[in-house]
Amino acid sequence: MPAPQCASCHEARAALRRPRSGQALCATCFCTAFEAEVLHTVVAGRLLPPGAVVAVGASGGKDSTVLAHVLRELAPRLGISLHLVAVDEGIGGYRDAALAAVRRQAARWELPLTVVAYAELFGGWTMDAVARSTAGSGRSRSCCTFCGVLRRRALEEGARRVAATHVVTGHNADDMAETVLMNFLRGDAGRLARGGGLGSPGEGGALPRCRPLQLASQKEVVLYAHFRRLDYFSEECVYAPEAFRGHARELLKLLEAARPSAVLDLVHSAERLALAPAARPPPPGACSRCGALASRALCQACALLDGLNRGRPRLAIGKGRRGLDEEGPPGGRGSHSRPDPRLRSPSPASRDSSSPLGSDDVGVRGRL
Ligand code: SF4
């Protein structure tokens, strides 16, 4: 049976049915509609004001590739300029190939690119070194816990180096729904409350962050990359299979099969969550070591590096967060007011590498 006519232009044959609406569109009309929807997300949410210098977290994967491509298309209309910022976590057999994809994109699209590396920012710690230190093997279940925290810090640092005013990341609706599910499963009310909305306005001196693809489904991101013939890196990080996120993803697939709107319903429900006063986390203060926003004496990145350097790597996420407090130095929060290069720490080679780690991931599959 021949493909139906495109429901938008009524000229070309349809190349797909949109997963959510069932609308039959040709490739050109689908890509135009996808870009218009991202534009609407940015404009309606006032995410990127005219004049913004936008650091695009670029991992080489499909989401950040699509994000960079769409924003490049929209940049003249939005009046923004773009700078790709890639993070090299130091993951052998994975990140080098992904970074090569980012370099090709930067060259093809004539966008400036800055790469920041964990090893440089965090005193020699790479993710492979963290994995060896935390589990005694290269494939720790908890790697994403560490990586998610460090990657957020590294992207912020990279964005500051290029004088960016805003940071954007490629999280799509499926990623956000998985995160909501994970936070529910952990009973992490604080993260649930913070996780709604399209981004953060930049509390505590951090740069404003947003996720322009947050309402786009993963399937449509893949379709857009396909029809635009985008060159991206599609292999999975070597540490991803052990991440807790994989369980949330499987659960989400089951939910979506029973209720196709489950992904967006979860995203929107997180936006509308309101915590009872007794459940609200205390207002965040400043990390006593680096000055970044922190809900404990040390921010998560400093607590994590402190534990690694002492051979006691622990990071608690969710309800039982004693690990951070126990590992924090005396003196409490607020004694320093600005980010501090002392976040850098001694070489991992000199540390005891035997301590176990007992927590789950906060990372997002090689995505920035
Ligand atoms: Fe880091 Fe992502 Fe790999 Fe986890 S899957 S270790 S968060 S790059």
Image (cartoon, rainbow, N blue to C red):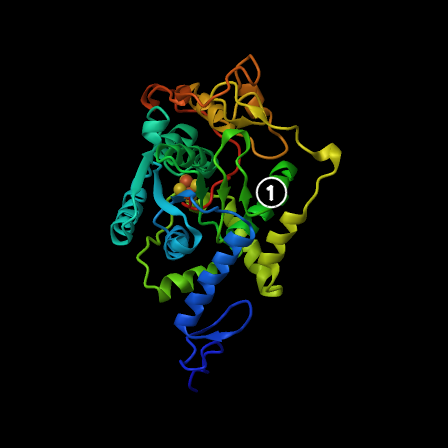
For the N terminus, the image quarter is: bottom left
Residue occupied by mark 1: 183
- Is 231 positioned to the left or the right of 78 in the image? left
Residue 217 placement (x, y as % from top left):
50, 59
For ligand 1, tell me if the residue under mark 1 lies within 8 Å.
no
The one nearer the camera, 81 or 144, is 81
| Residue 319 visible to an observer of this rendering | yes
Residue located at (49% from left, 78% from top): 7
Task: Check the image and report above or below for 141 versus 249.
Answer: above
Residue 30 placement (x, y as % from top left):
44, 69
Residue 293 placement (x, y as % from top left):
53, 28
Going by the picture, which residue comes out furthest to the top?
Answer: 331
Element type at mark 1: helix
Going by the picture, which residue comes out furthest to the bottom?
Answer: 1
Residue 233 placement (x, y as % from top left):
33, 53
Task: Check the image and report above or below for 107 versus 299.
Answer: below
Task: Check the image and report above or below for 69 versus 319.
Answer: below
Residue located at (35% from left, 54% from top): 234
Task: Check the image and report above or below for 128 versus 74.
Answer: above
Is disc 1 surrounded by few (<14), some (14 to 19) or many (20+) residues within 10 Å? many
- Is 318 positioned to the left or the right of 166 in the image? right
Residue type indicated by callout 1 = Asn
Please tell me in which quadrant of the rendered image residue 284 appears: top right
| Residue 173 visible to an observer of this rendering | no
For the C terminus, the image quarter is: top left
Query: Within the displayed image, which quadrant is ligand 1 positioned in?
Result: top left
